[in-house]
Amino acid sequence: MRKKIWYAVSKKGQGRVFTTCPVRNEHWGVWEAESVGCISMLFMMFEADGLELPDLKWQDDPVAMEITMELCHE
């Protein structure tokens, strides 16, 4: 199974993962789109294990990424 997600960084420098392509809100300095907390938590776990997310700034466009999950039979 594959899931496309997006990563963007707010004006304050906070990175966030979205399940739909976010739109920049200039007034508040944030990106707006659907976001699911458990996917954000998953990415925090991946970062703790060494995943390097793109080095984005507020002025950069969101980056699309893909999660692939497979069932492992052991």
Image (cartoon, rainbow, N blue to C red):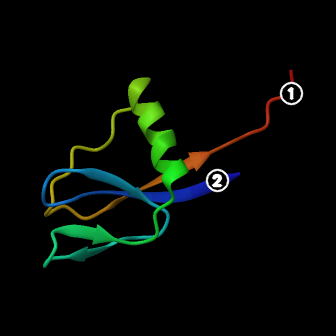
Mark 2–mark 1 Cα distance, whole angstroms, equals: 18 Å
Residue at 56% from the left image edge and 47% from the top image edge = 67
Comes first in the chain, label 2 or label 1: 2
**Residue at coordinates 34% horizontally, 54% vertically from top-left?**
16
Q: Which residue is mark 1?
A: 73
Residue receiving disc 2 = 2
Q: Quadrant of residue 59?
A: bottom left
- The answer, for residue 66, to whether it is visible in the render is no
| Residue sitting at x 39%, y 32% | 47
Residue 34 in the image: state x and y as whole percent. 46, 70
Q: Nearer the viewer, residue 65 or 16?
A: 16
Q: Do we see residue 74 in this rendering?
A: yes
Quick one: 66 or 39, which is closer to the camera? Answer: 39
Residue 62: x and y in percent read: 31, 62
Amino acid carrying mark 1 in the image: His
Relative vertical location of residue 2 with respect to residue 19 in this rendering, above or below:
above
Quarter of the figure that contains the C terminus: top right
Residue 27 lies left or right of residue 42; in this view the side is: left
